[in-house]
Image (spheres, coloured by chain):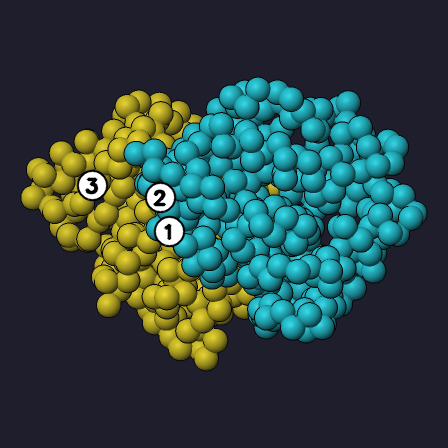
Chain colours: A cyan, B yellow
Amino acid sequence: MSKPENLTLTEEHRLFGGRQQRYSHYSASLKCDMTLSIYLPPQAEDNTPLPLVYWLSGLTCSDENFTTKAGAQRIAAELGLILVIPDTSPRGEHVANDPAYDLGQGAGFYLNATQAPWAEHFKMDDYISQELPVLLAANFNLSGKQSICGHSMGGHGALTLALRNPQRFSSVSAFAPIVNPSQVPWGIKAFSHYLGDDKTCWQQYDSCYLLSQSTHQLPILIDQGGADSFLPEQLQPEAFCQAAQARNWPVKVRIQPGYDHSYYFIASFIEDHLRFHAKHLG
Amino acid sequence: MSKPENLTLTEEHRLFGGRQQRYSHYSASLKCDMTLSIYLPPQAEDNTPLPLVYWLSGLTCSDENFTTKAGAQRIAAELGLILVIPDTSPRGEHVANDPAYDLGQGAGFYLNATQAPWAEHFKMDDYISQELPVLLAANFNLSGKQSICGHSMGGHGALTLALRNPQRFSSVSAFAPIVNPSQVPWGIKAFSHYLGDDKTCWQQYDSCYLLSQSTHQLPILIDQGGADSFLPEQLQPEAFCQAAQARNWPVKVRIQPGYDHSYYFIASFIEDHLRFHAKHLG
């Protein structure tokens, strides 16, 4: 394990009275150097302990997309939330990759791969759920309360991480999440490569399955664009709603008419999500 | 002149209840195809006549930077403002260029070039002040009121266009503008190439000079980051303040401590600028 203090600041900008920072660090779980973006709101200037919200991005994204396009920092500044925006996979010339946009670098799916050539580096589950919390606690003044949200593949990541570790999160939200990866092309392709053909190994990374098994009712908010071209084939939020209804779990799923899969959709509703998390973070 | 209806919609996204659009069109002034981004707020859905605000971007930018990074559409949606975001120069393989980032394509400086090889296409002054107003009026329901703002080279563009045509704008604002291009390296280089060595031809594109000659007190707001690395050599807002004081013109120039030259700075204060414009647009 690398020492938790091993974060190198590579960029810093004043933003809404706080600081948008970018760090480089060696990840022991991923066995490569990683880039991490963090927004510290103005309330962090006097070292007040603050809650944090993780943002997990979608296919092809890095830590930059949400940081530059979502407009989330304005609301985080008002609410006193630290935003943590990791990259979407291990990176580097020595890390396995694939020419397709939906496998390999940029497409880590927030799981621990078990199959060659992916198993050596693709441990995004460990990175997000084990390594980053230690690294962040060692470097920032955290209140200990946290929530998580994400988009598309990152919505899948947020929901599965929260459903598997409900005691660690106050709330979870997602934009256009892949809620049922075991049943849709993106998930079937990724899980076959990363986890192999035994579908029982896929269940721990399928939100619909995890919801059907969960005993802890975490607050959940999902927004889905009604004009999202991936909606019918890849996303299928109705599967998640059915799983929630079967458990009598009051999940809030909103279809936003006319909105697509882009960051314009995220920018339009991120304020609702951060206020939802702030309410549950207390 | 191309027909004003000759706008081709190439992209459209729902955003804050309105529409983020991208158009392609042939520009007769620039003699090339141009890309233009427009945000229509929700109030445009029922064809209400609306005021518009032009945004002019800085060196190396296109119509995309402000559109994706500034978070301006949220406020435009609330205030009922149309945002018009042109590209920063003529574009294309047949258009003159230079390997430097501060000359040629991406660096049009919002002027009409008179020198070879630039004079054929580099007529950004005509494009913004003559061609676009006709094109926009033919395609959108406009109230006829408009304001203008911009960043860096685009701040220079906004100030010079407004100071030369004060009857056409309700207000003008700028982030880190090049207010005195005749006296700083960016401006001296660009003006020498585009306008030649006769510095009397430069005056019409120098905000400090125009302010010293103006008889119409247009409302002006300027924000400048205190940690902007271009501040001492290229920007020099104090020259503009002195020119304003000499004319007893109450220009509002704010130095924002710690902020740099990036879009994080713009995002932090664009709300103030759009509210300033909305107030003067009535």
Label 2: state its secondary structure.
loop
Residue at (76, 55) in percent of width and height: A206
Decide: is B11 above or below B159. below
Q: In which quarter of the image is the C terminus of chain A?
A: bottom left
* CA distance for labels 1 and 2: 12 Å
Chain hosting mark 3: B
Nearest to the observer: residue B42 or residue B163: B42
- Residue A262 place in picture, x, y as percent: 61, 56
- Residue B122 place in picture, x, y as percent: 47, 41
Question: Sequence-wise, which precedes: disc 1 or disc 2?
Answer: 2
From the image, tell me which residue sits under label 3: B253
- Type of residue at label 3? Val
* CA distance for labels 1 and 3: 29 Å
Which of labels 1 and 2 is toward the front?
Answer: 1
Q: Which of the 4 quarters of the picture holds residue B151?
A: top left
From the image, tell me which residue sits under label 2: A16
From the image, tell me which residue sits under label 1: A79
Look at the numbered discs 1 and 3 and tell me whether their residues touch, using CB distance below 8 Å. no
Residue at (16, 36) in percent of width and height: B241
Question: Would you say A187 lies left or right of B99 here?
Answer: right
